[in-house]
Amino acid sequence: ITDVIGAEHGIGVENLQGSGMIAGATSRAYRRVFTVSLVTGRTVGIGSYLVRLGHRVVQVNQSPIILTGAGALNKVLGAQVYASNQQIGGPQVMHANGVSHAVAHDDYRGVAHIVRWLSYVPARVGERDFVFVSDKATFA
């Protein structure tokens, strides 16, 4: 680790600025290269937006992708509606809805998914090793 954003100036606006910079860079990279995120722990707020800015998302079990946690939602709703963050953004929700493209049992298997996907990515943008020709009747 060479830098910790916010260490000098404390936790606050500096972190939001950094998150905005990461979002911008990820969005620009999407147009130029294959982008993938591996969710290995709870991803909240801007972090949940960031993972979805890429082409692919691998979500490790027990790693929810949420905008707001169960506790905060329960407080706003005034009732114990959600039992856990997994119920809101676990793989059973996010993979089923297409937010995450693969679910892995652990970090190692998550990286294996990514390496497998990378094997299909061409060396240069715009290059393809195959051509797909569809028969319109197949999709009618």
Image: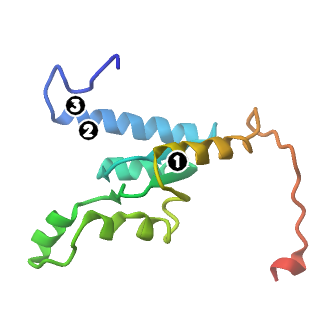
- Indicate the quadrant where residue 33 lies: top right
Q: How far apart are marks 2 and 1 (CA)?
A: 28 Å
Where does the N terminus fall, quadrant-wise? top left
The residue singled out by tag 2 in the image is 16
Q: Distance between the residues labelled 1 and 3?
A: 31 Å
Q: Which callout, 2 or 1, points at the residue further toward the start of the chain?
A: 2
Where does the C terminus fall, quadrant-wise? bottom right
Residue 95: percent from left, percent from top: 49, 65
Picture residue at 16% right of the left edge, 35% below the top: 12
Is 36 on the left-hand or right-hand side of 125?
left
Mark 2 burial class by Cα count in 10 Å: few <14, some 14-19, many 20+: few
Q: How far apart are marks 2 and 3 (CA)?
A: 5 Å
Where is 109 relative to 10, above or below? Answer: below
Q: Tell me whether circle 2 and circle 3 mark residues in contact (CB < 8 Å).
A: yes
Residue 104: percent from left, percent from top: 51, 55
Mark 1 burial class by Cα count in 10 Å: few <14, some 14-19, many 20+: many
Which is nearer the eye, 96 or 136?
A: 96
Where is 100 relative to 9, above or below? Answer: below
